[in-house]
């Protein structure tokens, strides 16, 4: 057998010493000789490979340089967005406090305040003086600063992180669902903080003799009704009002803004600051009217349920059912709607305008969705 083995190996330029001890170099020689006829992968490796120029990469997919730099949207950016949101909401709600006083009175006492918005102003001034139009101004400014902080800041946080997770091209296709989801999440958190201040404001507006201001009204509510009943009786209605309102507000504004740029053949990136501000105001007005109509029934219930004794006794949902039954569906949807459309349309337009202005003043570059065409440029 030894001779046979040695004979079979004569074809190789190797020398087998006694006991067939092989050196490492001899293994390499065997592999090079390829006794089993295996394919030579070295030829495949040496074959010319296709190289991609930068231009061909752009043709195959959009360039990474044209995508959004998500590293720029850090905690500093989110804090700037929250600050801008707090400022725009507190300013607008505070400025429109007189309109809100008239609107709330029309909802709470429609049998008395039934002469429209202008007539309501005249009635309140005649009966209580012009100062009555500023009733609830303190809780309005503070409450809506907190609410705007979490709402606008929260929308930016959720929106940007969802876009980064999905990818910008897919996010463009799901732009409206992303607006709706981010608005709903942010508004839910914001309303937890807003509800106590809104309950205090409504009580002060419905009963001016209830307390002298925010601290007095809040402390009396807790003392007489407890924290849960006093502050959070209106949480259900406020969620039913604010979440659909905010969802419509951001989704409609985003769509309206895109439509304005498309119809005029312009782009935000290449337009002047003044033009972009005008687009924000116009799209904000459209969004505000749509949001007011959608959320008005819940707004009426919220105003009613925070009035002392409204809906009788029982759970909050029972009281809301009683109130809705007493008012009727039509009146629930239409009482004070004209005044609210004026108020919310103006308010929403100003909010988006102020938000963009503050963001620009703080040096924050506002996040915008990018279309596939933008990504390829």
Image (spheres, rainbow, N blue to C red):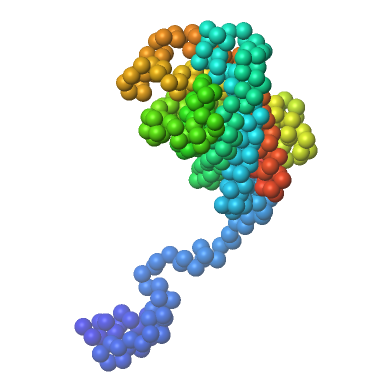
Q: Is residue 124 above or below residue 366?
A: above
Q: Residue at x 62, y 7 (%)?
A: 115
How many numbered callouts?
0
Residue 46 vs residue 279: left or right?
left
Quarter placement of the C terminus:
top right
Of residues 273 and 337, the one nearer the viewer is: 337
Q: Can residue 177 be seen from the camera position used here?
A: no
Res. 215 visible in picture? yes
Query: In the visual, does 1 lie left or right of 328?
Result: left
User: 75 left or right of 224?
Assistant: right
In the current view of this chain or complex, which residue is farthest to the bottom?
A: 18
Where residue 205 sits, quadrant-wise, is top right
Return the x and y of residue 267 as percentages of the image width and height: 73, 35
Q: Quadrant of the rendered structure where residue 49 is?
A: bottom right
Q: Residue at x 62, y 57 (%)?
A: 51
Residue at 27% across, 82% down: 5
x and y, in percent, of residue 126 in the image: 65, 14
Where 74 sits versus 317, above or below? below
> Is 33 drawn above or below residue 234 in the view shown?
below
Q: Which residue lies most toward the left here?
A: 1
> Which one is in front, 182 or 114?
114
The residue nearer to you, when weighing 1 against 334, is 334
Q: Position of residue 24 (x, y in %)?
A: 38, 85
- Quick check: 207 above or below 214? above
User: In the image, what residue occupies the spot 54% across and 31% down?
Assistant: 212
Q: Quadrant of residue 370?
A: top right
Horizontal and vertical percent position of residue 172 = 57, 36
Q: From the viewer's side, name the closer residue of 284 and 336.
A: 336
Q: Quadrant of the N terminus?
A: bottom left
């Amino acid at each position: 057998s030894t001779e046979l083995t040695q004979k079979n190996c004569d074809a190789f330029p190797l020398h087998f010493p006694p006991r067939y001890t092989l050196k490492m170099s001899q293994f390499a020689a065997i592999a090079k000789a390829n006794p089993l006829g295996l394919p030579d992968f070295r030829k495949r490796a040496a074959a010319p490979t296709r190289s991609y120029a930068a231009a061909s990469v752009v043709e195959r997919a959009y360039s990474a340089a044209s995508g959004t730099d998500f590293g720029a949207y850090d905690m500093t950016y989110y804090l700037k967005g929250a600050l801008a949101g707090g400022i725009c909401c507190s300013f607008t709600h505070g400025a429109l406090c007189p309109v809100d006083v008239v609107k709330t009175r029309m909802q709470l006492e429609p049998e008395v305040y039934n002469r429209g918005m202008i007539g309501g102003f005249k009635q309140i001034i005649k009966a209580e003086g012009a100062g009555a139009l500023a009733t609830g101004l303190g809780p309005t400014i503070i409450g809506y600063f907190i609410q705007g902080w979490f709402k606008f800041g929260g929308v930016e946080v959720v929106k940007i992180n969802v876009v980064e997770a999905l990818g910008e091209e897919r996010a463009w296709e799901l732009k409206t669902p992303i607006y709706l989801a981010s608005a709903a999440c942010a508004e839910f958190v914001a309303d937890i903080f807003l509800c106590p201040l809104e309950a205090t404001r409504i009580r002060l507006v419905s009963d001016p003799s209830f307390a002298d201001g925010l601290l007095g009204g809040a402390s009396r509510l807790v003392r007489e009704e407890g924290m849960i009943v006093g502050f959070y009786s209106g949480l259900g209605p406020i969620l039913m009002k604010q979440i659909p309102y905010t969802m419509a507000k951001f989704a409609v504004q985003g769509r309206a803004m895109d439509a304005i740029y498309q119809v005029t053949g312009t782009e935000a990136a290449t337009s002047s600051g003044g033009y972009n501000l005008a687009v924000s105001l116009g799209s904000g007005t459209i969004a505000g009217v749509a949001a007011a109509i959608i959320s008005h029934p819940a707004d009426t219930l919220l105003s009613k349920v925070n009035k002392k004794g409204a809906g009788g006794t029982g759970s909050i949902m029972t009281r809301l059912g009683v109130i809705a039954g007493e008012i009727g569906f039509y009146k629930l949807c239409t009482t004070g709607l004209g005044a609210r459309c004026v108020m919310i349309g103006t308010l929403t337009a100003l909010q988006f305008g102020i938000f963009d202005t503050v963001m620009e003043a703080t040096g924050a570059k506002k996040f915008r969705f990018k279309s596939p065409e933008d990504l390829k440029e």
